[in-house]
Amino acid sequence: MKDELNYILARTVAGKQSRRAFLGRAGALGLSAAMANSMLASAVQAAGPVKGGTLIMGLGGGESTNSLDPALAASQVPFHLLRTTGETLVDTTASGELDFRAAEAVESTPDAKTWMFKIRKGIEFHNGKTLTPDDVLMTLQRHADQNSQSGAYGIMQGIESMKVDGDYVAVTLATANADLPYLMSDYHLQMQPGGGMENPADGIGAGCYKVVVDEPGVRHVFEKHANYWDSSRGHYDSVEFVVINDPTARMAALQSGQIHIANRVEPKVAQMLATVPGIQVKNVSGRGHYVFIMHCNTAPFDNKDLRLALKYAIDRQEMVEKILQGYGSVGNDIPINAAYPLFDETLEQRAFDLEKAAFHYKASGHDGSPIVLRTSEVAFPGAVDAAALFQQTAAKAGIPLEIKREPGDGYWSDVWNAQPFCASYWGGRPVQDQMYSTAYLSTADWNDTRFSSAEFDSLLLAARGELDLAKRKGMYGQMARILQDEGGLICPMFNDWIEGVSDKVQGWVADGVQEVMNGLAPQKTWLA
């Protein structure tokens, strides 16, 4: 039996027979499915990456308005574009550690106010130019400029000065920040020749793959960057993204073999999809969260009582059960959960309370006119159904929600961060400072709730320089309570990332920082 098992295992790893055929024969030989799967996974990893081929990903979250400018990325497809074509100073691993990329080392002064990034030699941009410390400096300077409209602008505001010092780029902060290296992993901060100052949307990066076809909202094609510096990544000859915003069409493309990976599998179809031969459903929990966001400076949401009424009127547990089908956990009107270091576990869970919802709605003095909540299937998987559930529970408290379903194309440019009340999602960030600085600092470009609190801002800046972890945790707890009570964020649930993946894709690693292996599937996987 052992010889036959090894023979069929070797044939499967070599791609001469299907995984399904292996599992069938292994079962006939008396192995359980779990044991056979484990053996196959170990054998594939031991065999190492297979070079060549084309990976095709079907992605929801793409629009005709998408740009190749790293500063402007605001939805899934632009995120994957940057992760596939770009290189940041550092990245974070699935376990939360620093992964050095364009920087090969980092040092700091004892007070954590000046950080020195040593720039790796031998990195080449897609246009043949060698990356230099000056390119790094200019890239950071561009994202620190408010006119760039960068999604990373919030985390760059604490920088007092930057300069090149030989092989190093020195970053000096106005106040200390022990998390600065993690902030540099923000996916917007892709290195560009000359910092992208002249033409930020030219698509020239330093990542594994370079752009050869760019049809926003339709498809994007990339070929291997021949002189990429890291031989452990980039196993495909080419990669293609097909934009398929309709979730049903995306799953159909996966089942028919047109694509190898589909993002944003809806929880309601995940279990069914897992039964389809040749497809695996991958899910991992992390920092991602599905939200409804209110502009705190726009009527009627500039009224704290109205905001509290809406927060009490949403049944979070029902959302997790009916929308996430268990693929996630209950949220608490802050963007932070236990996946983050220094999470304050003493924060009281906000309960679904129709009496309190009705009390605050009456106290708000609202005139009873419809409160328009905008949503779309691209906001998050199940967003339209989630809005309908919200409407039903709010009605029980006498709150008149009106649901307006928006088209997917243009949602991230015309609705999110533009309209005063809408459905959205956040992928989370490696550390609390980055999440808060990106979206809740009063001056952040991506402050999509228009939240402004001098006390919150002051605590955020002070926490950056607090090296005593217990004190820092206490500051984050204070910030969470301020945001929970004062902010415009309704966070009913933290989601699992769920992807549908062909059996042909090997080397998959669970990474809950962002979807599809934190956007690194094109770099780290290969085809059997």
Image: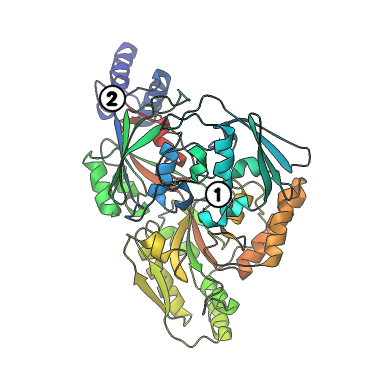
Q: Percent from the top left, x then y, of residue 246?
A: 28, 55
Q: CA distance from mark 2 to mark 1?
A: 51 Å
- Above/below status of 155 relative to 21: below
Location of residue 138 (image quadrant): top right
Identify the residue position indicated by label 1 in the image.
Answer: 143
Local SS, label 1: helix
Judged from this view, the residue extending furthest toward the left is 256
Q: Quadrant of the C terminus?
A: top left
Identified by mark 1, the residue type is: His
Identify the residue position indicated by label 2 in the image.
Answer: 22
Q: Which mark is residue 63?
A: none
The mark lying in front, picked from 2 and 1, is 1
Q: Percent from the top left, x then y, of residue 293?
A: 49, 66
Which one is in front, 289 or 153?
A: 153
The residue carrying pointer 2 sits among few (fewer than 14), some (14 to 19) or many (20 or more) residues within 10 Å by Cα, namely many
Identified by mark 2, the residue type is: Phe
Q: Percent from the top left, x then y, of residue 400?
A: 43, 81
- Above/below status of 490 relative to 528: below
Which one is in front, 159 or 526?
A: 159
In the displayed structure, does residue 63 sit left or right of residue 146? left
Tell me the residue at 38%/25% (across/down).
226
